[in-house]
Image (cartoon, grey):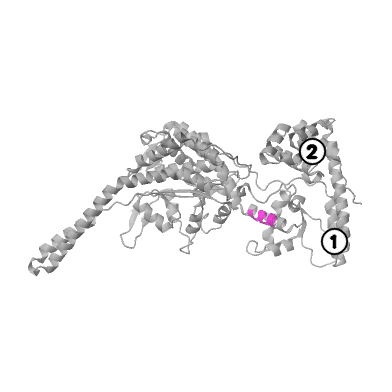
């Protein structure tokens, strides 16, 4: 007959019900219980939900818990909303919550003893050295006698990144972003970031914002949205950038007559120069000088006829060399827009074998760019304005952090990252399409902005008014302490140093999109800076998430690497020597390199140091050993509150 493991369902119901009735009780019992202490899986899931909500500062009453579980699709797993009321009805008094919690914890320890007995029995039957078996058995016993192991503290104290502030966008842009997100059931972050990239494509190279003291920022941005496969990135990209391609076709149609006329004039002048050269070659030497001068003048006339190039706003996966040529041809303006991240591999040297970031670095900063050509003289682009708008998969984000020069030369510091929550699996079916009036207004306004600014050769300069300049000073004052050694942005100081400039650039785009009719003739107001600051704070929050996932903090990155090994190998106990042997290829050159990561994991509650037995006699001391948090080695399919992957992975 199979023995039922020790448990007390009534105590489990009472402690959960007490927390639902009196949320303040959770703070008193959270250190006593972990989800694994509950015998019934539904109770373990409920306790994990309660502790997660409490840790993130959200309500833990029955209504909030039911809504949270319904959104995640887990409400049915716990018996539905009626079971939450059953739990609350089972509580004699919330004052005894601590008593119920101790009963649940004590039954969990008894189950652990039963499990230990079985494992010790199996260990006794195993082959191996008796001393090693005894040490392993002692380690098991030591683990059981440990008190309840509280849930670890996440390696980063970052909450889920904030939602995209759609209402900070001008009305016609916000309407389109909301409608596209609703129709495609994608995060508003995706359409919102592409909308900013589309505005940057229209205004980049044609407008600048002037701050106090002659400081100017061009109105072009680098944006990257991170979403997993199947997130409908391509569909949203096509919808949001379609008007740019339509505007490009309008510019081409407008330019065609001038191009045809110039080509014809060049052909006629070239023929005339050729005839003049033939006449000079075939004439009598005495008269050749005069004809030679005529031929030279004809050749110079033909060469002076410039043939306009076909207008182009958008490119996809171009090399740095191609981007430089297009910038020179297009008057310093170009947008690289793609629902994929292949451009990063190209920049890293996929075709050339060596990274080439100069064009993109200068194209963001607006620094003078020299373009060397094989068949024509070198050209200079005085103010290159390159726009980058991408949607990439999480793996690409982690890959680019390892690409040579991307961090050190400042490319990553120029990118506004967005790491929205993945909606796949929770999307509603049959949503309404984008209303025609909203789509038409977006296409018309974006196209009008492209056409209105296309004729500018020197960029329009939009000054800030006095109040807006004061707002920018406030941003700088707020940002500076964050960049210090103890600041929240200390590990992304390269990105943070460009934060104020990014906010000003966003303000310039919002200003132009708000004042479509001659916005370049009006100063930018404090209200526009305030709206841009809201978007800037959103990007700052998401930059922390993105750089966290890229491993901007080397110690945190190393700690995650160790956690991944523990989960992969299901190691409940390991020695430092074993860990170094497994991870010594490349990342950790010597055993001491593991110490910062191990210390961090211990401080966050993922590891405990196993007490060393008393030594008798001389000899080499044993390698330090570590015990791992039970949730790290929990079998697949059980409640697992710890994850070594960040929210970026979706």
From the top left corner, tell me how far across and down residue 355 is, in percent: 48, 60
Q: Residues within 10 Å of mark 1 (few under 14, many from 20)?
A: few
In the image, taking residue 545 as reference, residue 370 lies left or right, namely left
Q: CA distance from mark 1 to mark 2?
A: 34 Å
Helix, strand or loop for disc 1? helix
The image quarter in which residue 466 lies? top left
Question: Which residue matches tag 1?
Answer: 135
In the image, taking residue 382 as reference, residue 104 lies left or right, namely right
Which residues make up the magenta segment? Answer: 557-564
From the top left corner, tell me how far across and down residue 299 is, in percent: 19, 59
Q: How many marks?
A: 2
Q: Residue at x 87, y 58 (%)?
A: 120
For the residue pair 460 and 430, the one nearer the viewer reads as: 430
Is residue 287 highlighted in magenta? no
Question: Which residue matches tag 2?
Answer: 29
Which tag, 1 or 2, sits closer to the chain's start?
Answer: 2
The image quarter in which residue 538 lies? top right
Q: Residues within 10 Å of mark 2 (few under 14, many from 20)?
A: some
């Amino acid at each position: 007959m199979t023995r039922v493991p020790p448990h007390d369902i009534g105590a489990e119901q009472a402690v959960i019900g007490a927390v639902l009735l009196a949320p303040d009780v959770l703070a008193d019992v959270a250190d006593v219980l972990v989800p694994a202490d509950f015998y019934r899986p539904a109770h373990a899931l409920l306790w994990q939900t309660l502790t997660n909500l409490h840790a993130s500062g959200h309500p833990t009453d029955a209504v909030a818990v039911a809504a949270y579980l319904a959104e995640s699709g887990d409400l049915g797993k716990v018996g539905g909303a009626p079971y939450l009321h059953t739990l609350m009805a089972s509580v004699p008094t919330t004052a005894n919550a601590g008593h119920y919690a101790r009963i649940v914890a004590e039954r969990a320890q008894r189950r652990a003893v039963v499990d230990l007995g079985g494992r010790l029995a199996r260990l006794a039957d195993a082959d191996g050295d008796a001393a090693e078996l005894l040490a392993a058995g002692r380690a098991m016993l030591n683990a059981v006698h440990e008190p309840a192991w509280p849930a670890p503290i996440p390696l980063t104290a970052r909450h889920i990144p904030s939602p995209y502030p759609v209402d900070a966008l001008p009305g016609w842009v916000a309407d389109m972003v909301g409608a596209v997100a609703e129709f495609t059931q994608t995060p508003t972050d995706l359409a919102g970031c592409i909308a900013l990239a589309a505005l940057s494509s229209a205004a980049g190279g044609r407008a600048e914002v002037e701050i106090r003291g002659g400081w100017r920022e061009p109105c072009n941005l680098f944006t990257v949205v991170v979403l997993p496969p199947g997130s409908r990135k391509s569909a949203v990209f096509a919808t949001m950038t379609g008007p740019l391609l339509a505007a490009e076709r309008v510019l081409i149609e407008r330019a065609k007559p001038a191009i045809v006329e110039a080509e014809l004039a060049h052909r006629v002048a070239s023929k005339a120069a050729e005839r003049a050269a033939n006449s000079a070659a075939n004439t009598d030497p005495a008269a050749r000088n005069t004809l030679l001068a005529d031929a030279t003048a004809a050749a110079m006339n033909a060469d002076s006829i410039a043939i306009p190039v076909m207008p182009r706003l958008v490119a996809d996966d171009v090399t740095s060399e191609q981007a430089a040529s297009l910038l020179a041809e297009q008057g310093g303006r170009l947008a690289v827009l793609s629902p994929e991240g292949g451009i990063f591999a190209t920049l890293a040297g996929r075709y050339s074998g060596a990274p080439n970031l100069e064009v993109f670095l200068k194209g963001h900063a607006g620094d003078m760019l020299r373009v060397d050509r094989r068949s024509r003289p070198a050209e200079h682009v005085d103010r290159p304005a390159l726009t980058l708008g991408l949607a990439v998969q999480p793996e690409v984000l982690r890959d680019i952090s390892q690409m040579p020069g991307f961090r050190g030369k400042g490319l990553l510091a120029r990118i506004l990252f967005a790491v929205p929550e993945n909606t796949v699996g929770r999307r509603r079916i049959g949503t309404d399409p984008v209303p025609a009036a909203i789509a038409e207004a977006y296409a018309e306004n974006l196209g009008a902005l492209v056409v209105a600014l296309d004729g500018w050769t020197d960029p329009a300069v939009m000054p800030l008014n006095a109040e807006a300049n004061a707002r920018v000073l406030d941003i700088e004052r707020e940002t500076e302490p964050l960049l210090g050694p103890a600041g929240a942005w200390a590990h992304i100081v390269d990105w943070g140093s460009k934060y104020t400039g990014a906010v000003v650039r966003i303000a310039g785009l919002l200003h132009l999109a708000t004042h479509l009719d001659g916005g370049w003739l009006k100063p930018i107001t404090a209200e526009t800076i305030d709206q841009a600051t809201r978007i800037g704070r959103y990007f700052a929050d998401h930059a922390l998430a993105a750089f966290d996932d890229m491993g901007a903090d080397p110690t945190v990155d190393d700690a995650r690497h160790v956690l991944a090994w523990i989960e992969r190998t299901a190691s409940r106990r390991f020695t430092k020597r074993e860990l170094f042997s497994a991870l010594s290829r490349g990342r950790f050159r010597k055993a001491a390199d593991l110490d910062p990561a191990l210390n961090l994991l211990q401080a966050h509650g993922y590891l405990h140091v196993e007490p060393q037995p008393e030594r008798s006699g001389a000899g080499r001391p044993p390698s330090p050993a570590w015990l791992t948090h039970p949730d790290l080695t929990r079998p697949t399919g059980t409640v697992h509150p710890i994850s070594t992957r960040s929210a970026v992975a979706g």
